[in-house]
Amino acid sequence: MDSHALLAAARAAVDPALNRPLGAAVTEVTVQDGQAHVAVELGYPVGGYARELGPVVSSALQAAGWSGPVLLNLSARLKAAAAQGSVKPIPGILNIVAVASGKGGVGKSTTAANLALALSAQGARVGILDADIYGPSQPLMMGLAGERPTSRDGKHIEPLRAYGIAVMSIGFLIDAEQPMVWRGPMVTQALMQLLGDTEWGELDYLIVDMPPGTGDTQLTLSQRVPVSGVVIVTTPQDIALLDARKGLMMFRKVAVPVLGIVENMALHICTRCGHAEHVFGAGGGERMAAEYGVPVLGSLPLDIRIREQADGGRPTVVAEPTGPLALAYDSMARRVAAQLCADATGATVFPNLSVSDD
Ligand SMILES: Nc1ncnc2c1ncn2[C@@H]1O[C@H](COP(=O)(O)OP(=O)(O)OP(=O)(O)O)[C@@H](O)[C@H]1O
Ligand SMILES: [Mg+2]
């Protein structure tokens, strides 16, 4: 077979992270010593992705008549998502991704922590900004409770580091026992300072853990911070979906791209018998995604390990990196990053995304 035919076949293979053909991401196919070498350059982190993409490319070449071995040469070229609005990018930070919802307690902080850790495990440079000024969660979840950041020049603060990522939270600067009784403008100012005064260094992704609701923090963030996109977390419960819709609409209104929906606590798997049950009803996230024309980026079951590991300061992605839950976070993270470089017109909707625990 000539390499032109192989190149066409590889380009037609469907990238699972974007649910569309690889196209120009396949830069070259060469045949050497009876082996097909396929070079693929993607706009999102590729660590661990050969496992998933390798078989897809191999079968595409086989379907086109190739019978020899296929070697995948994967590389990532991370870049900033297309600029939105008039807010200037922050030097050194390529992409800012907010994790939000309308409702409290749906798993934003847990999702943000595992998303950040999964992107880092895939090879990206990652930070987390805890934007929940009233109820910061990241110090505890990242195993940094009680730690204090330092400053080299008295003006900027060094973020704390956990599992290779930079973390900043108001929780590091105030007494954990002290309830926050600030007024709106102070919250806004605190958020802008946490973002602006932290020495983040070079980051591919800064993940922002948002507080619940559609209040000051959300407005500040969308108007004054160059947010590349927002991930909406929801449980399939109807009421949560109503609130999630409000959250989604708010970001749409202020023209922050909605990257997609993460359905959390979608399914409960009994620890005794393995029986799977839709505690909050099935398919809500998918319905909402279809309604708004955005993809479901991931679906996480209600699993006691997710809670215990996050509350224990060692989120699932680092606690059980090869387990099924970490793999679900891994594929969610890749889809989030992939959506950032998908052109705005080509939003993808994944059909029938399902969760399993085996
Ligand atoms: N998939 C899950 N399975 C089991 N427990 C979970 C799951 N996701 C989150 N939790 C747990 O649910 C609780 C709420 O999660 P989390 O703090 O992430 O929600 P949140 O949306 O950030 O809440 P808030 O609105 O208060 O900021 C935590 O105890 C967390 O460990
Ligand atoms: Mg939270």
Image (cartoon, rainbow, N blue to C red):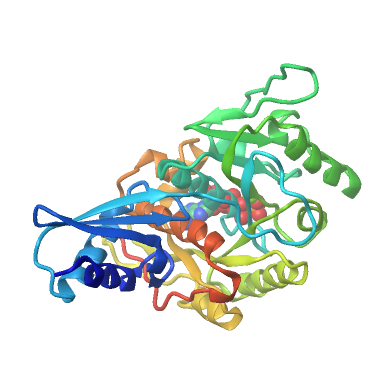
State the image coordinates of residue 19 (x, y, percent, origin top left): 41, 72
Q: Position of residue 222 (x, y in %)?
A: 76, 58
Report the quarter where the N terminus lies. Answer: bottom left
Image quarter hosting the C terminus: bottom left
At a point 72% along the width and 19% down the height, the residue shown is: 151
298 to the left or right of 63: right
Q: Residue at x 46, y 37 (%)?
A: 314
In this picture, residue 99 sits left or right of residue 115: right
Which residue shows up at 41% across the image and 45% down it? Answer: 122
Instruction: Please count the marks in the image.
Output: 0
| Vertical placement of residue 157 versus 94, above or below | above
Q: Please give the name of the residue rendered at 38% of the width and 39% of the height, measured from the top-left corner.
A: 319
Residue 64 shows up from this direction:
yes
* Rendered location of residue 240, percent (x, y): 62, 69
Is residue 164 or residue 149 the one in the foreground? 164
| Front one among 112 and 203 | 203
x, y (%) of residue 14? 34, 71
The vertical placement of 117 against 246, above or below, is above
Asked which quadrant contains residue 186, the reply is: top right
